[in-house]
């Protein structure tokens, strides 16, 4: 299961990570709010809803390119692993990657990221279940 089209899976994993990271590099100061403020939850939920839509589209496209039975599950697992490893480096070097974000915005990004990786793992399971 995991050896089939691994190169395509790794490429998509890196592209998903790159897309999300570039989004926050360019728009993070606009969409990330202080988690200790009352307006955090509604904006956080909207951001996660947009994340669900974006990830679902990625999984649909990936499934067309790799029609194997567990392709989207493979992307969810490999993509999460690749992204988490790279994001550890990004957070370690936050001043290089996110120089314009405050500490509160960086915390909001980290909260978004943790939730988004959960979605990255769960969405394919629901998609896979729907195929039966």
Image (spheres, rainbow, N blue to C red):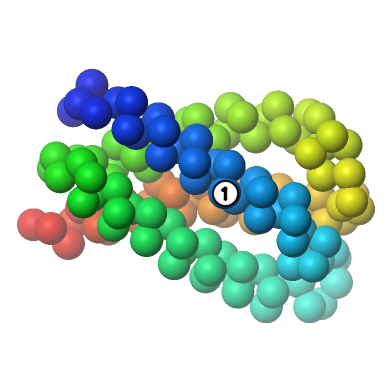
Is 31 positioned to the left or the right of 95 in the image? left
> Does residue 129 appear in the picture of this structure?
yes
Q: How packed is label 1: few (under 14 Cα within 10 Å), some, or many (20 or more)?
A: few
Residue position marked by numbered label 1 in the rendering: 19
> Does residue 111 appear in the picture of this structure?
no
Check the image and report above or below for 105 versus 37.
above
Give the image location of residue 83, x and y in percent: 54, 35
Residue at the location (38% across, 54% down)? Answer: 58
Give the image location of residue 76, x and y in percent: 37, 42
Is 75 positioned to the left or the right of 2 in the image? right
Image quadrant occupied by the N terminus: top left
Check the image and report above or below for 95 versus 34.
above
Q: Quadrant of residue 97?
A: top right
Is 125 positioned to the left or the right of 26 in the image? left
Image quadrant occupied by the C terminus: bottom left
In this rendered view, identify the residue nearer to me: 80 or 24.
24
Give the image location of residue 71, x and y in percent: 23, 41
Check the image and report above or below for 111 versus 41.
above
Is 39 positioned to the left or the right of 7 in the image? right
Residue at the location (87% across, 52% down)? Answer: 101
Query: Which residue is most to the top?
Result: 3
Question: How many discs mark residues in the rendered view?
Answer: 1
Residue at the location (81% across, 50% down)? Answer: 106
Give the image location of residue 33, x and y in percent: 81, 66
Residue at the location (53% across, 68% down)? Answer: 50
Mark 1: which secondary structure?
helix
């Amino acid at each position: 299961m995991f050896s089939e089209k691994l190169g395509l899976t790794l490429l998509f994993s890196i592209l998903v990570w790159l897309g999300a990271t570039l989004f926050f590099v360019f728009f993070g100061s606009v969409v990330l709010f202080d988690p200790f403020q009352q307006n955090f939850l509604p904006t956080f939920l909207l951001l996660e809803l947009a994340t669900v839509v974006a990830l679902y589209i990625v999984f649909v496209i990936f499934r067309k390119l790799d029609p194997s039975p567990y392709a989207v599950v493979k992307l969810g697992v490999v993509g999460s692993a690749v992204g988490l490893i790279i994001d550890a480096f990004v957070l370690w070097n936050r001043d290089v990657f996110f120089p314009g974000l405050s500490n509160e915005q960086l915390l909001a990004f980290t909260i978004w990221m943790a939730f988004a990786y959960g979605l990255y793992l769960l969405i394919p399971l629901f998609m896979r279940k729907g195929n039966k």
